[in-house]
Image (tube, grey):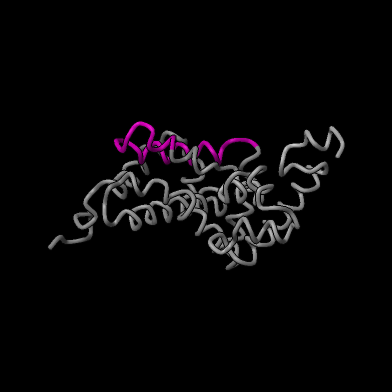
Amino acid sequence: MTASRARRRPGRPAGGSRSRESILRAARASFATNGYDRTTIRAVAASARVDPALVHHYFGTKDRLFVAAMEFPIDPAVVAETVLGEGLDRAGERLVRLFLTIWETPGNREPLLGLVRSAVTNPRAARMLREFMTRALLSRIAPALGRKDAELRVALVGSQVVGLAILRYVIRVEPLASATEDELVAAVGPRFQDYLTADLAAAPGRQST
């Protein structure tokens, strides 16, 4: 064994960039075919013909592998930290502002538009987006709510996030498309807050028993 080989770190082969690209190709194929939930690090590694440790070395978690493979500019850990870092008070407003900031950042909109447009017309893309939103992003918020219906609450938030994206950025419905960030935060933030913390049974249009 040569000295250079002896010093090589485990799980980091000489053809590092080629291995990384192979992992990303395998991940894209798996996410497209199997969806987010059924894709595993082990299966992606097997398809790319690398050790699972190498996938973890480059990407850490399945969440981050999805972000890299689908060019999805949202790190789930950052979302949870930003939204919940100051507690639940006004978390709805922070979530709306973060969402809009991500979409308005140069370089982010095209991959997001591609995924959302695909989700509208392609069942596989829709499943990937739905599963990622619920499992990787919003499920990180649910435990902080401390409620039995937390999953329903985050699903309702997710429906509003996707709906807002489609109407503002894909269909471009006015005046929603040209509304300012502050206007949308003021209008939508309280609705998100209601979904997160209010009594859903007492929401407008419903009668409590």
Camera-nearest residue between 66 and 20 = 20
Identity of the residue drawn at 46% across and 35% down: 181
Q: Quadrant of the N terminus?
A: top right
Identity of the residue drawn at 59% across and 35% down: 105
Q: Is residue 18 left or right of residue 112?
A: right
Furthest residue in direction right, as rendered: 2
Instruction: Tell me residue 124's x, y (percent).
Output: 60, 66
Q: Is residue 176 left or right of residue 126?
A: left
Residue 92 magenta: yes
Residue 130 magenta: no
Camera-nearest residue between 127 and 162 = 127
Identity of the residue drawn at 70% across and 53% down: 51
Instruction: Tell me residue 44's x, y (percent).
Output: 67, 58
Magenta part mainly helix, strand or loop?
A: helix
Q: Quadrant of the C terminus?
A: bottom left
Q: Quadrant of residue 9?
A: top right
Camera-nearest residue between 9 and 187 = 9
Instruction: Tell me residue 74's x, y (percent).
Output: 55, 43
Furthest residue in direction front, as rendered: 1
Range drawn in magenta: 81-106
Instruction: Tell me residue 7's x, y (percent).
Output: 78, 33
Number of numbered discs visible in the structure rendering: 0
